[in-house]
Amino acid sequence: MAIFLTEHSKVIVQGMTGAEGSKHTKRMLKSGTTIVGGVTPGKGGQTVDFDGTLLPVFNSVGEAMAATGADVTVVFVPPKFAKGAVVEAIDAGIGLAVVITEGIPVHDTAYFWAHANATGNKTRIIGPNCPGVISPGKSNAGIIPADISGPGKIGLVSKSGTLTYQMMYELRDFGFSTAVGIGGDPIIGTTHIDALQAFQDDPETAAIVMIGEIGGDAEERAAAYIAEHITKPVVGYVAGFTAPEGKTMGHAGAIVSGSSGTAAAKQEALEAAGVKVGKTPSATAALMREIMQNLG
């Protein structure tokens, strides 16, 4: 199986006619994703040819869902218009919104996250500022390269896009049920905990890799959750052991203030919950490799 995204998912792309949306729509199609259309206000009724695959363009998410049965949207809308695009997807009641856009103002993310909760939370938001979700061999919603790993029984949840790619490549001989890039902004939709529980409930996920980074307390909260609720083996990595205090590192949420949010504190919390933590991404992959070999 897979979590959040399966071979049955019908995907639309908000911003499909833009440069980034067009480029990655083509890549997603090549990886086997069932894309049924795109959304660009004012361009409804047009058709775009992606190397022989003709996709319709709709003026709104609601219109696209009604015409195609879409249940997933991937958002490649510029930061200025991203809030409106995500709110539109939420109001249409789509099941999953994968928000790739980087640089969305925090108050805009807070607005659409709160709006999703206020409207019954029918829409799961992944991101923003994330690489998306891939269930290898089934579907790929976002910008994760589809050829770095195949299907398998490892679940991966990560704040970092590039570390997602590295971990998938290093464990490619085992493969992945689903890899979820949740993004590293201060406010995100789906959290480590959400993904951990979904992997716990997925009978075809045997073990889980969790990648975090400095800043905030998401990893500490995930550690507490693992101790109480997760029975499958989990290995972890925390990026940012050498990050200087008070300086944002890579992601807007990756900043250490005083003694809070340090990599050492997160590692300590995870290890106290029984999670083996690697000192480097490759060491983390080696820990998972050992677990998978023991599981047979």
Image (cartoon, rainbow, N blue to C red):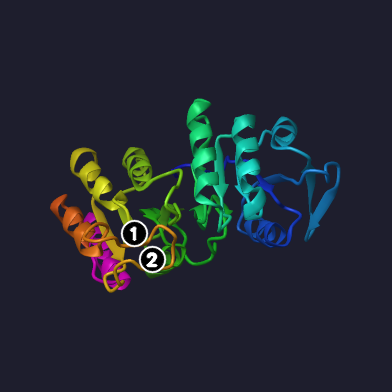
> Residue at coordinates 13% horizontally, 52% vertically from top-left?
272
Image spot of residue 203 (x, y percent): 35, 40
* Distance CA(mark 1)–CA(mark 2): 9 Å
On the image, numbered disc 1 is attached to which residue?
211
Point out residue 72 in the picture as x, y percentages from the top left corner: 59, 41
Can you say which quadrant of the picture contains the C terminus? Answer: bottom left
Is residue 85 among what the camera can see? yes
Indicate left or right for 49 with 11 as reference.
Answer: right
Describe residue 179's horizontal placement relative to residue 116 as left or right: left
Q: Is residue 21 above or below residue 85?
A: below
Provide the secondary structure element on which disc 1 rests.
strand
Between 200 and 131, which is closer to the camera in this rendering?
Answer: 131
> In front: mark 1 or mark 2?
1
Question: Which quarter of the figure is the N terminus placed in?
Answer: top left
Residue 126 lies left or right of residue 156; in this view the side is right
Among the two numbered marks 1 and 2 on one chain, the one whose residue lies closer to the N terminus: 2
Left or right: 237 in relation to 78: left
Q: Amino acid at mark 1?
A: Ile
Q: Position of residue 35 (x, y in %)?
A: 67, 47
Question: Compared to 168, does 83 lie above or below?
Answer: above
Q: Which residues are magenta?
A: 278-296
What residue appears at the point 62 percent right and 30 percent down from the top-left corner?
91
Q: In what element is the residue under mark 2?
A: helix
The quarter of the picture where residue 28 lies is bottom right
Could you say which quadrant of the image residue 165 lies in? Answer: bottom left
Main SS, magenta residues: helix
Residue closer to the observer: 32 or 67: 67
The image shows residue 4 at horizontal and vertical percentages of: 48, 42
Provide the residue designation for mark 2: 167
